[in-house]
Amino acid sequence: MAEASSQRAAGRLGDNPGFLAARFTSLAATVSNRALAPFGLRARSYSLVELAASSGGMSQRDIGQILCLDKAHVVRLVDQVVAGGLVVRTRDPHDGRAWLIRVTPEGASVAEAAGRALDEAYTRMLGSLGDDELDTAMTSLRRLAFGLDAEA
């Protein structure tokens, strides 16, 4: 179904931000998971490794907040990625009750290669957008992802 035809067929849903966000999320997750499969990762596990790599170590609480996951989901995700040897848990030197998730050397290498694969996959996915459209879309997505309150 062509873009205009699909949009017409969606009816009122085409003006529903929740539907549009969910549809884009589904498409983006499919692209992400295909690009990450050769690395043995999926979108969430890659996100965890990337957060650990880019931060130098991040608390499980902060990871949950950024990824919008509850504590139990974060623990399971960390367990999975620790088992793969990509991150390790260490005690936070400033709070002995908290765990920091740190990337391993293998995890850093995988994060770098997987990040490049994702960049290429999204370049293909979003290739029909001009530079200005892409910049506007990314600015809007960042604002929607980080600037809004779910309680509103």
Image (spheres, grey):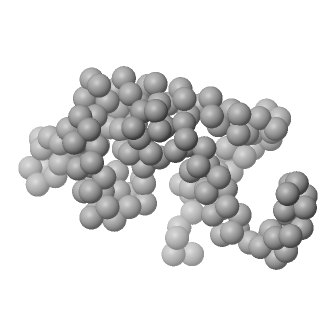
* Residue drawn at (54%, 36%) of the image: 35
Direction from residue 15 to residue 53 in the image, left or right: left
Side of 96 relative to 85 (left or right): left
Q: How many numbered circles are shown?
A: 0
Q: State the image quarter where residue 32 is shown.
A: top right
Please tell me which residue is depicted at 23% across the width and 34% down the height of the picture: 85
Q: Is residue 73 above or below residue 53?
A: below
**116 displayed left or right of 82:** right
The image position of residue 61, as x and y in percent, is 28, 56
| Camera sees residue 61 | no
Residue 63: where, in percent of width, then height? Answer: 34, 51
**Quarter occupied by the C terminus:** bottom right
Viewer-nearest residue: 95 or 3:
3
Q: Is residue 30 above or below residue 85?
A: below
In the image, residue 16 above or below residue 63: below
Q: Quadrant of the N terminus?
A: bottom right
Q: Quadrant of residue 103?
A: top left
Does residue 126 appear anywhere in the picture?
yes
Location of residue 97 in the rendering, given as x and y in whole percent from the top left corner: 11, 54
Q: Residue at x 28, y 34 (%)?
A: 86
Q: Position of residue 95 (x, y in %)?
A: 13, 49
In the displayed orientation, state which residue is furthest to the left.
96
Q: Residue at x 71, y 34 (%)?
A: 124
Of residues 19 and 59, the one nearer the viewer is 19
